[in-house]
Image (cartoon, rainbow, N blue to C red):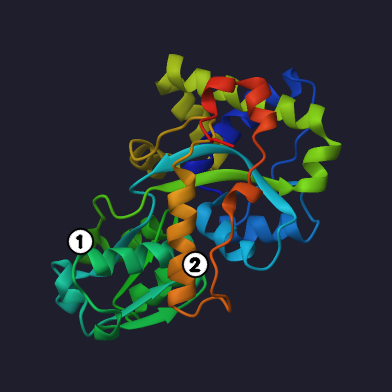
């Protein structure tokens, strides 16, 4: 999983032993990003990955042996920009002429493009630099870059370093990000009972969020790790936690695919058929009303 607030349902299920209650053993492996989590799954080092939509889009041009079987969270404020006020940045237009970094070919890269377009800023008007997520806070603090597009915990780390020299920019109706459970199609076919029990545990975690949100937040914060409670509490209000498979995922994936093609990120000219990357039966068996994908 990507170890931040967006994976709270998994963190709650782990901490509350909901997986064990449903009769399965689950080892939760933390990764710096959903992109890396998906790579681990595709390489066979993990059975399931929790990842944002953009890594799904990127890999859909390379292979078709994996599928999304649930969405566990969504947000329109999961990615944003942090910049340095002392570099003369007070509003989005001030990013022109500046060095703005992000993680290449990821959800935060897609957000950056959509944010710039929404603010009528041409990408050619600034220098976009691609870096590893873990290197961004120090690069901003040292002055190597002027801003970066990312998420927590990396933005929180940068703010801790910069103090009141930091300024943040969110996108309004720029990008609704989904966070999804993905597995290889063979894994889904061979482990139907385990997948069903996994989903039941996550639905139980969602029910805890609905019935006792304060306790659920504290449990998730414990699962996230020591010293990150304030980060989770700040992020929490930006997310909707629900186990679902919604028809609205298709426009997101298709828009990302067109963006990747137009920007030369992929060597392709055709948008994949994302219906072929969905496996609706596991969630339909557990919670049919949560599946709105039309076959």
Q: Which residue is mark 1?
A: 164
| Front position in the image: 192 or 271 | 271
Q: Residues within 10 Å of mark 1 (few under 14, many from 20)?
A: few
Q: Position of residue 177 (x, y in %)?
A: 42, 49
**In the rendered view, would you say 157 is above or below 275?**
below
Residue extending farthest front: 295
Give the distance between the C-alpha atoms of the residues marked 2 and 1, in whole angstroms: 22 Å
Which residue lies at the image location 63% right of the left edge and 63% below the top edge? 59
Q: Tell me which numbered mark, 2 or 1, is placed earlier along the sequence.
A: 2
Which residue lies at the image location 42% right of the left edge and 67% below the top edge? 109
Which residue lies at the image location 48% right of the left edge and 24% below the top edge? 216
Specify whether 282 is left or right of 167: right
Which residue lies at the image location 59% right of the left edge and 21% below the top edge? 288
Residue extending farthest top: 211
Quarter of the image containing the C terminus? top right
| Front position in the image: 12 or 245 | 245
Q: Residues within 10 Å of mark 2 (few under 14, many from 20)?
A: many
Q: Which residue is mark 2?
A: 133
Q: Position of residue 17 (x, y in %)?
A: 68, 24
As helix, strand or loop, the secondary structure at mark 2 comes to helix
| Front position in the image: 66 or 212 | 66
């Amino acid at each position: 999983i990507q170890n931040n607030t967006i994976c709270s349902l998994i963190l709650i299920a782990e901490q509350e032993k909901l997986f064990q209650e449903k009769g399965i053993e689950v080892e939760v492996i933390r990764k710096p990003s959903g992109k890396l989590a998906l790579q681990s799954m595709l390489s066979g080092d993990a059975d399931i990955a929790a990842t944002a939509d953009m890594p799904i889009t990127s890999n859909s041009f390379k292979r078709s042996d994996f599928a999304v079987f649930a969405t566990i969270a969504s947000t329109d404020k999961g990615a944003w920009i942090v910049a340095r006020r002392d570099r003369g940045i007070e509003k989005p237009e001030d990013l022109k002429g500046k060095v703005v970094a992000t993680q290449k070919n990821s959800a935060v890269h897609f957000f950056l493009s959509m944010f710039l377009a929404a603010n009528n800023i041409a990408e050619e008007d600034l220098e976009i630099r691609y870096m590893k997520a873990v290197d961004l806070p120090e690069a901003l603090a040292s002055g190597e870059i002027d801003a970066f597009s990312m998420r927590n915990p990396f933005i929180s780390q940068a703010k801790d370093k910069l103090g009141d020299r930091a300024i943040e920019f969110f996108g309004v109706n720029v990008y609704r990000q989904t966070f999804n459970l993905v597995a290889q199609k063979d894994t889904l076919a061979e482990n139907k009972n385990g997948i069903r029990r996994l989903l039941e545990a996550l639905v139980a975690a969602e029910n805890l969020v609905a019935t006792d949100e304060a306790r659920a937040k504290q449990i998730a914060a414990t699962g996230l790790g020591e010293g990150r409670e304030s980060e989770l509490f700040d992020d929490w209000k930006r997310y909707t936690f629900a186990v679902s498979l919604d028809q609205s995922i298709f426009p997101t994936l298709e828009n990302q695919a067109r963006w990747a093609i137009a920007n030369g990120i992929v060597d392709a000219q055709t948008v994949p058929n994302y219906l072929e990357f969905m496996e609706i039966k596991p969630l339909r068996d557990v919670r049919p009303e949560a599946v709105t994908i039309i076959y």
